[in-house]
Image: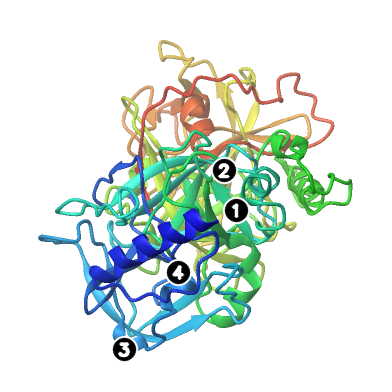
Amino acid sequence: MAFFRAVRVVVLVTLFAKGAHFQSDVSVCGQPPLNTKIVGGQDAPPGAWPWQVSLHRSDGHFCGGSLINKDWVLSAAHCFLSSLNALDVTVYLGRQRQKGNNSNEVFRSVSQIIIHPDYNSVTFNNDVSLLCLSSSVTFTDFIRPVCLAAADSVFHSGTDSWVTGWGNTASGVSLPSPQTLQEVEVPVVGNRQCNCLYGVGRIKNNMICAGLLAGGKDSCQGDSGGPMVSKQGSRWIQSGVVSFGRGCAQANFPGVYARVSQYQDWINSQITTDQPGFVTFTSSGTDGDLSVSCTGLIPVTTTSPRTTSTTEICKVQDVVCGSASRNTLRVGGSSSLATGGLWPWMASLHRGGRHVCGGTLITEQFVLSSADCFSSSTNASEWTVFLGRLNQNGSNPNEVSLRVNSITLSNLTGNNVAVLELASKPTLSDFIQPICVDLGTETFSTGTQCWIVGWGSGQGGAERTLQEIQTSLVDCGDSNSVENICTGFVDLQQGDDGGPLMCKQGLAWFQAALLSVANSSPKSSSRSSSASRSDVGPHAPRIKAFTRTSRFSGFLKSTVGSFPSTASNSTSSNSTLSNTASLSSSKTLIKV
């Protein structure tokens, strides 16, 4: 203990010599309050972590933080022990380096600092704070909010995580000029094991640990308040706020972070408008931390919070795809107007207040569309997704509108698709359900009756009601039937892009292909100019080729992750999704 007290004095002297503002009585186990930064890390590329902020006082950078919406920043409570005066703090966003030019940065003053009311400066319990910016920021490729882990999130031991910041590279060793933002990859260390390392009772349920037990990678002084994030699908979710540790990157002493998921209610109670995006992070398999034991550690029981969380995760997996309770399938090949709930997975993608493309809800939080729709803009903040919509003009009592967190484009030769990650999960209903996506498991025979729906321009009457048409699958002839699926000719219009070609397999609806006005090719003469969307005239093209969704199976699985199970009693023998599909498809990620 005497040794740690001596170390504490040396570190404090070093920090005060650099002009930092700290109190000397807030440490535990001989460590100063700001004992957190990237050790064993590397320079982060510009824009890689667009939510990272740098907090400054008159003497420069003193803590990190994360942008959680256009007006608020999440940080650590202990960053403000020396002063709660908001006028003393400046927030830099889009910053890459502490010295030199930062062409993508903006700065804001702070109008309010809110410390968690139960913050304990001795134990670092509830080490979280919120900063309200003096004015809203505009999102760019270099300035975007991070998603926050929702209350029911589960981070198993070993979960891959990243920590970012401008802190020291070792205890008392400053980041060398130009002090570029650092990133380091660390695994989560379970709370049971972390308690055994720090002393049973030291690590609370509202804390989360991460680091290599062998040491060498960690946060350090100057990183405090910054984010620890983990990736789920194409989205980054903040699991922790850099809080404390013993030294920097010491063996058997992982970094300790405030567990973000424990503060959802408190954060939402402080931010009453434009609340941050809380997203459930789920860990698969069994948590190895449950088997950890040491003297004084209470054995795991079946009523532990972790067991309860696992049960909740199983409930999420009960969502099924391809079920449309209001769909009474009609027969006939002519175009007609849909009614509410017939195609509950249909999404309308809006930009600038108008419908641009169609899409389909493929899981609770992901929408599939055509990459062509985003040729004008891949900025996720410019797009809105409407679910449960029937009419583009007029009333839609069953619809919801959702912001977009990220847009991920496939990058294959030829046609490509886009996956939109929604900022929040919609409540599923008769009017909002996911469709099943064929990832190569389904067989669609020639003659199968399938449907196409969309809001093509000039269609659907004054209210621009969703249009539907039945068509039959035909032999593709000399077209590549592995990548293409063919139907009788359908006259697509602008606005139909991104919608589905869908066929019923047993009791479940599957999306077999994606509509693309530019790239869906007729197999004979040019497209008819008739307003009808069904087969047109004796001289019209007889076949239309569409790219199968199965062509993008690797990309979709790597981007979306798991898919809902198929609606029960499906007669398709191939409805179970393979977990061994290739993940080699390349992609372009537009982070948010």
User: Does dot 4 land on a helix, a strand or a loop?
Assistant: strand
According to the picture, the residue beneath numbered tag 3 turns out to be: 87
Q: CA distance from mark 1 to mark 2?
A: 8 Å
Residue 246: x %, y % from top left: 49, 53
Between 388 and 566, the one lying in front of the other is 566
Q: Is 416 displayed left or right of 174 in the figure?
A: right
Mark 1 touches mark 4? (CB < 8 Å)? no
Amino acid type of the residue that numbered disc 2 sits on in the rendered structure: Val
In the rendering, at what x and y percent does residue 258 appear? 56, 61
Assess whether mark 3 and mark 1 are in contact (beta carbons under 8 angstroms).
Answer: no
Q: Callout 3, which amino acid?
A: Leu
Disc 3 from disc 4: Cα separation = 17 Å
Q: Where does label 2 land, which residue?
A: 188
Q: Closest to the observer: 368 or 356?
A: 368
Q: Nearer the viewer, residue 473 or 203?
A: 203
According to the image, label 1 marks what residue? 208
* Residue underneath mark 4: 75
Residue 382 visible somewhere in the drawing: no
Q: Seen in the image, is 205 located left or right of residue 187?
A: right
SS for callout 3: helix
